[in-house]
Amino acid sequence: MTPGARLQSAISVLSDIFKSGRPADRVFDTWARSNRYAGSKDRAAVSDLVFTVLRRRAELTAAVGSDDARLLAFAALTLGAEQGVDEVAALADGARHAPEPLSPEEQTALSMAVLPGESAPPWTRFNYPEWLHPEFEAAFGNGLEREMAAFMERAPTDLRVNTLKMKREKALAALTGEGLSAEATPWSPWGLRLTSRGNVLGLATFRDGIVEIQDEGSQLACLLAGAAPGEQVVDLCAGGGGKSLALAAMMKNHGQIYACDTDARRLSGLTPRVRRAGIRNLQTRVLGPFTPDMADKDLAGLASHADCVLVDAPCSGTGAWRRSPGARWSLSPEMLMGYRAAQAEVLTRGARLVRPGGRLVYVTCSLLPSENETQVEAFLAVHPAFTPQPWASNWPEHVPLPPAPHGNWLRLTPASTGTDGFFVAILRREARS
């Protein structure tokens, strides 16, 4: 592909994302499948421009005074790289597969474009919706700018070593032997962070179930859940099952883990992953609707029997914005309200399963207080049998503590821990007197 064709492809992908509201990675994958002539370098160039625009959308919009996908793509090239307006304009020569020439208005907007300075509002400089600013301000206070700046960076690729099959040191050597370089993650005892690019899914270490792709923050949430051999563990919102696999490895194939979800299609993808990982103590359950004032027929046999219930709740996903920069622009107040309602429901559903003395572990990939602290406090107000446990007191002794404030809740962020953003609360059901 010519540079002009790459630019036009990025414009087409961005236009689809802006108009349809579909997840950016799905739109890009659809484009890639429909344009198989595009080589790996072409796909990388188009992807880089698309996700640069999504990551810096507010800045670029302020710079050119427009939210038009085409103009933002040109602006990303002129403001984010060492290319002049004339050089970028030359790519739009109207040739086959290239963009149409710049209009006089577009030429003027690009010539006068300047990125926002320090006097601009933080939501413009750090690229997030203005309506979410009160939430982030409540979460981070004086540290807001440092925290939001970290979300502008690209996320690393982390792997979790399946300790049922291999220790981390040997897995690292195996990756090296396959041509990838990596290093141990600083906090998770099972984590490896890639320091080179490569097709992980094509590696023997992946096909043989030795490693899984999983952010270190997600690994730490599992670590804090404390699943132990012989326990009865419920992963109530298992989805694709990444955390279920980690919990099962912690249990060393002893005890039982129930991976549950309302989406049968997503849950079905867990079966081959379980087989590949050599896990024998996991079963899946597809859940129907939940009615708080009625018996939960899908989980009746587990009521008050689970040692640990992990509620990896549906949420806004603000903690994963480094990986999904387009998600920050598709989130709406109505969607957030729906997530909050779902969180309250799954907490109530999960609470019924915890045995006296057991624990309910609430996890979100969100940094919004309304989905985290506020949600847990509302649950505790109507479930007095549960008591929050300081996260550090539940941390394994042999694992270094991440740099997070001590208290009842653990909050991980890209700025503080170099992970995706996560919130974890451990709620213990008091034993009967």
Image: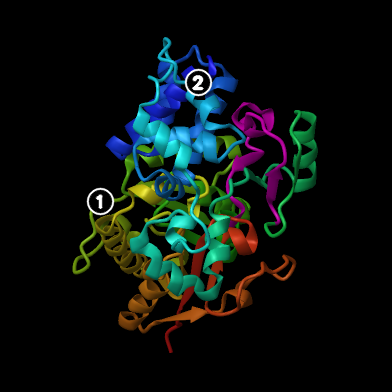
| Rendered residue at 30%/81% (across/down) | 382
Who's the residue at 48% across and 46% down the image? Answer: 56
User: SS for tag 2?
Assistant: loop
Residue 124: quadrant of the picture: bottom left
Q: Which residue is drawn at 40% across and 28% down?
A: 11
Pointer 2 and pointer 1: residues touching (CB < 8 Å)?
A: no
Count residues near mark 2 (Cα–Cα under 10 Å), then give few for <14, some for 14-19, many for 20+. Answer: few
Q: Nearer the viewer, residue 191 or 186?
A: 186
Q: For residue 166, which numbered disc appears in the image?
A: none
Q: Residue 288 shows which numbered tag?
A: 1
Q: Earlier in the sequence, mark 2 or mark 1?
A: 2
Q: In this view, does 433 lie above or below 192?
A: below
Rendered position, 329 above or below 348: above
How far across and down, in percent of the image, does residue 340 sit?
Answer: 31, 64
Left or right relative to 150: residue 286: left
Q: In the image, what residue type sits under mark 2? A: Ala
Rendering coords of residue 433 (x, y %): 43, 89
Q: Which of 397 and 56 is in front in this view?
A: 56
Does the segment drawn in magenta span residue 143?
A: no
For the point 33% across and 52% down, the residue is 331
